[in-house]
Image (cartoon, rainbow, N blue to C red):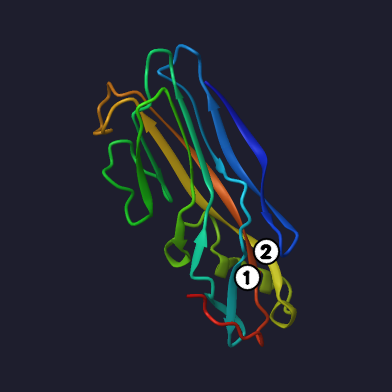
Amino acid sequence: MNKVFVVGNRVRVAALALTVFCLNSLEVFASTAPIEQIELRPADIDTPEIKVAAIAGRYTHMTTKMHLFGLRLFAKAGPGRRVRYGKIANGSFAMGDAGAGRYWHRTIYNKNRMLEQTITPNLPTETLNWYGMSPIEACNEALKSDSDVLKYGKMTDAKVFFQLGVALKVPFSGDVSNPSRRTTLVYALPVKCLPLENEIKIQK
């Protein structure tokens, strides 16, 4: 199996002229494999920053309550086969799982050799599965090295984890005769640590 990691998918943030880079995986297998290719990467959309506010000298909460993600899914079965089932989740899962724990997930049914979709889930920031530090933790980490963050604010980033799994049968049901593959995406988001005196209404 040859695994190629691609760095450099750009998510444009027009208002701040800021480019955030995501790490996605493109996995390519032999042409005789049941599933030849699987890929998960960010769609090229403008995405606003996650805003984090401070109380009493410490960052405590996100004022951004929802975030719109753009995700491009692709999988290709081997000759004479079809990708019949897929699942994408904001968290890891076993192929036989009915869900993905408490994290957002979506099931996809397909009838063709290739599965190709772009989806744009709008997800609550409070329930996201963060990869590493959350936006609140990232802002407090920035504050440790620069006390002026509370005075002037600062841009940083946080990362969200997604996983895509596909199979040749419906459902997965843990069937060992059901060829399947999984891949992951680390989706980086811009984070704006607000100055302490900044008063901003919580987004509805």
Left/right placement of residue 33 relative to residue 146 reads: left
Residue lying at the far front of the rendered structure: 111
- Identify the mark nearer the N-term, 2 or 1: 1
Residue in front for this viewpoint, 167 or 72: 72
Q: Dot 1 corresponds to which residue?
A: 139
Residue 156 position (above or below residue 147): above
Callout 1 crowding tier (Cα within 10 Å): few <14, some 14–19, many ≥20: many
Amino acid carrying label 1: it is Cys
Residue at 49% over, 33% down: 74
Tell me where residue 17 appears, x and y as whole percent.
Answer: 75, 60
Residue 126 lies, in percent from the top left, at 45, 67
Counting from the top left corner in percent of width and height, residue 175 is at 25, 27
Question: Is residue 183 placed above or below 82 in the rendered structure?
Answer: below
* Label 2 environment density (alpha carbons within 10 Å; few <14, some 14–19, many ≥20): some
Give the side of residue 95 with respect to residue 189, left or right.
Answer: left
* Quarter of the image where one finds residue 196: bottom right
Q: Name the residue under label 2.
A: 156
Task: Give the residue displayed 70% in from the left and 67% down from the top.
Answer: 155
Q: What element carries label 1?
A: helix
Q: Are the residues tagged 2 and 1 within 8 Å (C-beta)?
A: yes
Amino acid, disc 2: Thr
